[in-house]
Amino acid sequence: MKRKYFIIIIFLIILFACVRGRKEEKKSQLNLDFEKVENGMPKGWHEIQQDSNYSISLDSVNVKSGKYSITIESKSDSACFQTLLLEIPNYDGKQITLSGYIKTQNVKDGYAGLGMRIDALYGQNGINFDNMQQRGITGTTDWKEYEITLDMNPENTSQIAFGGLLAGKGKIWLDNLKITIDGKDISKAKLYQPFSENAKNDITFDKGSNIVFPELNEQKINDLELLGKMWGFLKYHHPEVGKGKYNWDYELFRILPAFLNAENITERDKTLLDWINKYGKIPVCTICKETPSDAYLKPDFSWVEKSDMNSDLKTKIRKIYKNKNQGKHYYIKMMPGIGNPDFTNENPYSNISYPDAGFRLLALYRYWNMIQYFYPNKYLTDKNWNEVLKEYIPKFVLTETRLDYELTTAQLLGEICDSHAFLTGFNQIESMRGSWVAPVKVQFIENKWVVTDYYLDSKLSKAEKENRTGLKIGDIVTHIDKVPVELIVDSIKKYYPASNEAAQMRDIAMNLLRSNKHTLPVIYISSNQIIQKNISLESPQSLYQYISKKNSTNTKSYHFIGNNIGYVTLKTIKDEDIPNIKKEFMNTKGIIIDIRNYPSAFTPFTLAPYFVSKPVPFVKFTIGNPNNPGEFTFASSLEIPVSDETYKGKLVVIVNENTQSSAEYQSMAFRTGDNTTVIGSQTAGADGNVSKILLPGGLSTFISGIGVYYPDGRQTQRVGIVPDIVVKPTIKGIKEGRDEVLEKAIEIIKSEK
């Protein structure tokens, strides 16, 4: 029982810490009496389901007052615990009190109570927590008021979370909650405002930067490279910038005219020094820490030492670094839980259809510095990241159209070699690719572009599909509009960011047969015959609707193959499927888990434990540090826990280039099984929680926000999940309608080895 309560406490600590506060939540909408109802639940509250043996519902009969109370009830003897939560932003004050009425019925093997946690900023210990474990309510009790009081620390708080919980068996009713801060109702309390309003209120350049660039000779490009690195350094290190006192985008536009007019290095350095001094003296930092000696990645300031800046500027930079911003930062924070970067208060300038030269340079500076300081895989790029900024300065400044800007941005994203780094908001690229699409799926098989499926109604016969598209399954496309496909791919691959070739070819295939015309001339090989034909194209909307329907998660996720092999696809798996999978497949010879898809549920701690007989480490992360940008350190490894029973048969996990992100993470979890074989081909090599990046002109992209490694330190980014046995589809197998990888999985299970 003690172990059970310990697990509950740890889970709740993590749980409260991981829930993101709704920063825009108004005090009047807290719904502490559960009277506002939405979709059968009290509006704003979150049901955290640890297992399906609990139910949470509104009760209109047993109430303290008003129309409704909320009830949590266990439904079986295997109950563990269940919580109902509400998150609120950070308030100013010294103490916060949660009070509320609770009624219970037959609570045993645990307790009922209130719970509240004050979450600290990332990188700091939790501030305060109480879940009434030491004074929990048991048995059957009538309505009674209870309360929890915690000391506050607004300066170091990220959010506050609270609610009710039932650990063990029985039933609890909760009603008429109240929050007070320093004795005052929360409706009269003030939100903590850590940042100045200056940055938000600066609208000077909303209609344009007004920057005019001179001819970009070698020296001017070198100077702009230095400015970009200096601008980013100050953005993430200078304490006054971190407080939100300055719109840092617009401070760039303010310094640029004088900087561009500098006629020599001496004038340039004086301009930079005056610019830095404008933001006042740097207070001595008494809590700044040195970069740990065991940090996996350390801040890189080689650009400072290699620069031709004068000694005064270099000294100034060193001083700012030594006394850099600590704690809350206007432009960066780490997401609760795992800790990937959250780039806050970044304006996408969506109202600017084609950003002027100043805003285009801003886009480059913004992105380069985000990668420089907060991308955990910067060291894995093909190019030295320090050299990328200079290369792209003339490309961004000299673009002449919106399309050029989008293409240049896409090419820049490709430099980080991350399959998560795709571009969105690219309306001109989309128009260039074409408004009409062939209703067939093309894949890169045996180094050829092969038709593998139709994006057509499944009710159509094979002959009808062939007639409508002009193509057969297994046909090899060699030319598009008389141009060899290899040349087309070579010319466009730089616009398709990817961790590895497998993911890049996957993404290119999606847009290969597109045009702005209703037909597309292609040359292809079919039944050993070379055929030239104009194939008909269709509206992308109709195809996307079909693809969406085909990818629906309503299909059952598991079934038998024969009498003795279980098959599970994570594409449609649901949490409630897992107990049934364990029960129905318990005595099978083997189970196949197909992860050639994106999972619809998170299974590392629910299904993966079924395949291990002892706790097994399966992953560890590197996490960035906003208090020391550029530093990444390893967190402790996570383990697959042991379940009540362990599967005795074989487990075969299938992966391929469609296995990306969460799919790769879950593949790592299943790999720890006692008798597991991973088969298939290279995965997409983009693991870890994603972080979104906004760029001028309404563009956006993503990065893998944490470094993901095996417990022994082997990387997964770019490499992906390496199969134990490599099995790839063949053109022959595709023509025959076979799933050769699945066949291999069945063969492994049936073998006696």
Image (spheres, rainbow, N blue to C red):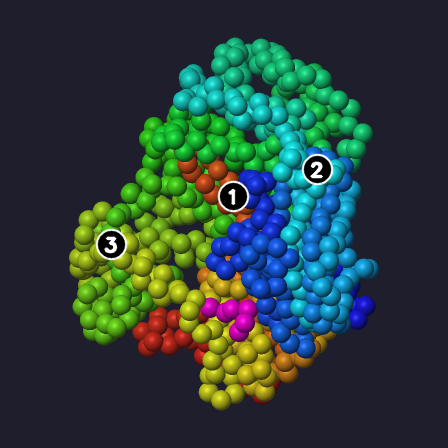
Q: Secondary structure at mark 1?
A: strand
Q: Residue 235 — which label?
A: none
Q: Position of residue 358 (x, y in %)?
A: 45, 23
**Residue 366 in the image: above or below residue 543:** above
Amino acid type indicated by mark 1: Lys
x 59%, y 13%: residue: 271
Q: Looking at the image, which is closer to me, 131 or 667? A: 131
Left or right: 637 as drawn, with respect to 449: right
Q: Cα distance, mark 1 to mark 2?
A: 38 Å
Q: Label 3 near label 1: C-beta < 8 Å? A: no
- The residue lying at 28 percent from left, 54 percent from top is 540
Per the image, the residue denoted by label 1 is: 692
Magenta: main secondary structure: loop
Q: Is residue 484 magenta?
A: no
In the rendered image, which quarter is residue 321 located in? top right
Q: Are marks 1 and 2 in contact (CB under 8 Å)?
A: no
Cα distance between the residues tagged 3 and 2: 60 Å
Q: Given this view, does label 3 or label 2 mark the residue nearer the observer? A: 2
Residue at numbered disc 2: 184
Up-down: is 348 above or below 702? above
User: Tag 3: Cα neighbours inside 10 Å, few (<14), some, or many (≥20)?
Assistant: few
> Which percent across, then down, holds residue 651?
58, 77
In this rendered view, identify the residue nearer to me: 502 or 128.
128
* Image coords of residue 552 (percent x, y): 40, 65
> Bounds of the magenta span?
572-577
Residue type, label 3: Ser
Can I make out residue 230 in this image?
no
Image position of 425 (left or right of 119): left
Q: Which residue is mark 3?
A: 539
- The mark that comes first in sequence, 3 or 2, is 2
Left or right, 441 with reference to 69:
left
Crowd band around label 2 with a 10 angstrom C-alpha radius: few (<14), some (14–19), many (20+): few
